[in-house]
Amino acid sequence: MTMVEKTGFYISLFIIVILLFLIFFSKNGVLDYKMLKEKERTVLRQVQTIDQENQKLETEIKSLKTDMNYIKHVAKHEHDMAEEDELIFKDKSGNKRKTP
């Protein structure tokens, strides 16, 4: 190889190395792409979780609007209410029985 060919080869090799470095480590390079894809997956998982929670809340709202048995259940268990023929006994001493 002549001196000119060697110089051209080394210059070409240098340019290729610089381009590869820019492809991987630049602002919009491969590493940023991988980081953004992982962030996208995280956000999509959060969206899916929130969608499931919204669906559950919509079902509960619909039940509270239309299902009398569900309304009674919520009143009884979440608000300590009773029907007309029921009695509620509460332990005021603060001692709760431990069940084995």
Image: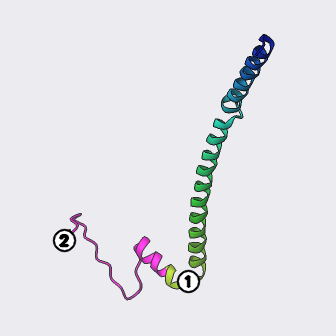
Nearer the observer, 42 or 25: 25
Residue 45, horizontal then vertical, whole percent: 58, 55
Residue at the location (42% across, 77% down)? Answer: 76
Q: Is residue 91 magenta?
A: yes
Q: Is residue 71 above or below residue 2?
A: below
Residue 24, horizontal then vertical, whole percent: 66, 32
Q: Main structural element of the magenta stretch: helix, strand or loop?
A: loop
Q: Residue furthest left?
A: 100
- Say whether disc 2 or disc 1 marks the residue closer to the N-terminus: 1
Colour convention:
rainbow
| Label 2 packing within 10 angstroms: few (<14), some (14-19), many (20+) | few
- In this image, 98 relative to 26: left or right? left
Q: Which residue is mark 1?
A: 67
Q: Is residue 55 above or below residue 16?
A: below
Task: Determine the secondary structure under disc 1.
Answer: loop
Residue at the location (73% across, 26% down)? Answer: 16
Q: Residue furthest top?
A: 3
Chain part drawn in magenta: 72-100
Question: Label 2 sits on what residue type?
Answer: Pro
- In this image, 97 relative to 24: left or right? left
Report which quarter residue 12 is drawn in: top right
| Label 1 packing within 10 angstroms: few (<14), some (14-19), many (20+) | few
* Viewer-side label of 2, 1: 2
